[in-house]
Structure formats: C-alpha cells, structure tokens
Image: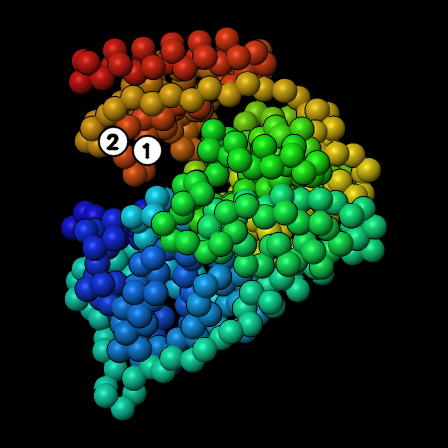
Amino acid sequence: MSTRKLFGTNGIRGLVNVELTPELAIKVGAAIGTFFGRDKNLILGFDARTSGPMFAKAVISGLNASGCNVYLAGLASTPALQFGVKNHKLDGGIIISASHNPPEYNGIKVIWSDGIETSHEQETEIESIYFDNKIVYAPWNKLGEKHELPDVNEEYKNAIKRHVDLPKLASKHFHVVVDAANSVGGIACPPLLRELGCKVTTINANIDGTFPGRLPEPRPESLADLSKTVKAVGADMGVAFDGDADRSIFCDGNGTIYWGDKTFAVVIKQYLLKNPGAKIVTPVSSSTLIKDTVETGGGELIWTKVGSVTVSQTMKAENANLGGEENGGIFYRPHQAVRDGAMTTVLLLNIMADTGKSLDELIAEEPQYFIEKGKIECPDNKKEILQQKIYEQVQTENVSTIDGVKIWFSDGSAILIRPSGTEPVFRLYAEAKDSDKALKLVENYTAILKEFLSKL
C-alpha cells in the first residue's frame, strides 16, 4: 500500500499480515469511525476467509474506540450486508472481504447509509483522517458498543422474493446448480432457490476459507466442475459466485459458461420491454453487445469508468434502475443499486419462466461478438503519457476517453486500452463479429503500445 493511499478500485485490500495487518485494521476502523462520527450505528460482517474473524475484531475495536456502535452480522455475502444497512436504517457498514482475490488476501469495504459503497471522495476523507492523524477517540465512558445482528441473511433472502412472480417461477420447477466457491454464496442463495420451487444441487458449498474447490474469482476456465455437474444432473442452469457473492457467472443446460455481458444483455432486453426508454449504466469495459441491446430496446445507455462503486454512484445520480459489468456484476435498483449475485440468479430464472425459453435460447437471440484480451507491462509513471500517445494516434476515430481509450470501428468491432488501477500494466479488451478480427486488434494495438513505450 502506498504511503498516502488506502483504497483501490474496490475497497482496501492486501496480503494478510503483510500489507493488511491487525494493527492497520484497528487504525482503519478508528478512521472510519471518526469519518462517520460518534454514536453512529454500523453493520459489520465478513466472507469465508480464514482471516475474516481476526480482522472483524480489529476493525470493531477501532470503531468502538471512536465511539461507534457495531452490529455484528457475522458470515454473510456483501449484498446481504448492504441490504442489512438499509433494512435496519443504520448509518453505514464495514465488510471484511477481498471479493475475488485469492485466499491469502483480505480487505475492508465501507458502506454508506443507502447500502452503496462510499464514493471515492468519501474514501479520500477517510484516508486524510488516517494519514494526517485526525482520528478522534471517544472518552472512556463514551465508547461504542457491539451488538449481534443474527438475521441479516434471512431478511435479505426474503427481500429478493418480493421482486419475482412467485407462482409462475415455482410452477417451472427449475433445477439449478450453485457453485458457492466455499464461501458465503452458499448461505442465502440455495435455500432461497428451494423456497422459489427450484431443485438445487450445490458444489463447493461447505464454508472453507482456503477455497479448496476453486479460487474465488469465477472465470470460465475455472468453472469446469460447474459445467460437468450441470450436464451430469440435467440441470436447467448453473451459477458460480465470487468470494463475497456479489458477482455471478452463469452456465446453461448444455454446460456452456457465459461471461457477464451475455447474461446482462438478457436482463436488459427483458427490462426494456417492460420499461421502455429506461437508463442502463455500464462501464466502458462492457461489450458492444450491451450497446446494441440497449439501442435495439430503445433504452438510454450511460457509460462509466470501470469499477462497481462508479456504476452504483452513477445509477444513484442518474436515477437509473439497472446497471451491469462484464465480470458478472448486475445492479438491480428496485432491490438495491449494488452488485448482487443471488438477485441476478433470480432475475434470470424469472425471465426464463416469463418467456418459456432456456438460457441458451435467450443468449442465442443476441448479436454474437468474440472477445480477446491482452496486456503489456508499463511502469506506473509512464501510464499517463502512454495513454496520451495512443489517444493522439486514434483521435480521428469514434473514441471515448471516459476510462482509458475505447475505439469503436465502423464494422462493429471495438477495442478498449486502459491502464490497470492495481498493476503496472495496460489492459486491452477487443471484440469483433469474428474471433480472428478480435485477436488481430489485440495484436496490432499491443505492437503500437510497445513501440510508443520503447520511445518513452
């Protein structure tokens, strides 16, 4: 962690007991408590990581020391905790999770009173309190208290039910395979689906913070077991969650795994049929498929920088009810304007029940794009000038500079070139109507970047 930076794209993250230590967590807790103010009431929970309870105790100590009361929810998904903030009318929350990172990492996310993660401006305030020693500790007789909040998962599960056609969904008796990644995705979603009339088969459902089944990031190449299980048991659909269950990647009845763009497009299409002209929010890293689907459905597309915090904050500012990311995050604001894996699963099942179509049939109706990705190493101190060079090269094209440089070509292909916010690399995301074209775009622009870099 840099000397003046705590928060990354999505909360504070680091290697357990190397970058993220109990000592740091206590001080961060006190800084967060100072930011919220004395006597504020905050929820706190964690995912399955082995270090979760340790960091929970450390952060609670810092919060209580600054005079904040903590409502401990324990093991729960990020969206369940975010819902808990709103449902119990609390002032905010802290989630101990490193989301999709490997088990040796953990992290701290801060939630505002509306259940949405704090804005980047608010994160800067917390950093200022932390680094400039502005922490305000409470007197000995004004310390915060810790309370238990045991029913968060049940309340969250029941809230999702309010957004579906229960009789219609129950009548379909869908069979769903849930890959819970040995984490909190297995707490609320499997019983929720059973209560909605589904047959549920689970894999990697036992809580184990070493993530023995697979790593917490649900990527097509790591979900072979989900695909095989769906085919073996004849299920209608499979879903795989990340470590804190705010993201979900889906598999159809044939065992085909889909990136988040594909399933988000299914949700957009059906949403716009019922809500013509609606605003849809998505980062510039999303596929042209999203642009096509929104335009065909008569919606209004709002592009944002990459990052779930930015999508949520933009939805709030624009009064938009639907957002999504290519990594499997869907934000359904009638429930809550945050990524929510269980809500997304139920939305898709509801669409399948409404249309009478299988997931593969729904996806086959979409325009088909092939995606290729690449990256090149680039020192952080050269990122800005390299981005300027690439922009100068392509500025006569149809270009967006919301986050990096995204170029749309007349044949429907596109490429996004952006500096990573967490690593010394530039990432390239290309797509086209055929795979060779997408691969060629990555190769061509990788060569251009390398040539510019060699001259810097």
- Which residue: 36% across, 70% down? 36
Q: CA distance from mark 2 to mark 1?
A: 7 Å
Taking depth in this image into account, of 110 and 386 the one nearest to the observer is: 110
Query: Relative to 315, does residue 231 appear above or below in the rendering?
Result: above
Q: Splitting the image into 4 quarters, where does residue 137 fall?
A: bottom left
Label 1 crowding class (10 Å Cα cut-off): few <14, some 14-19, many 20+?
some
Q: Amino acid at mark 2?
A: Pro
At which x and y percent is residue 233?
A: 67, 38
Q: Are marks 2 and 1 in contact (CB under 8 Å)?
A: yes
Taking depth in this image into account, of 174 and 55 the one nearest to the observer is: 174
Q: Amino acid at mark 1?
A: Ser
- Which residue: 20% across, 51% down? 19
Taking depth in this image into account, of 401 and 268 the one nearest to the observer is: 268
Residue furthest out toward the front? 232
At which x and y percent is residue 342?
A: 60, 51
- Which residue: 44% across, 9% down? 440
| Residue 40 appears in the figure | no
Q: The C terminus appears in which quarter of the rendering? A: top left
**157 horizontally vs 78: left or right:** right
Q: Splitting the image into 4 quarters, where does residue 43 fall?
A: bottom left
**431 horizontally vs 58: left or right:** right
**What SS does tag 2 mark?**
loop
Task: Provide the residue designation for mark 1.
Answer: 420
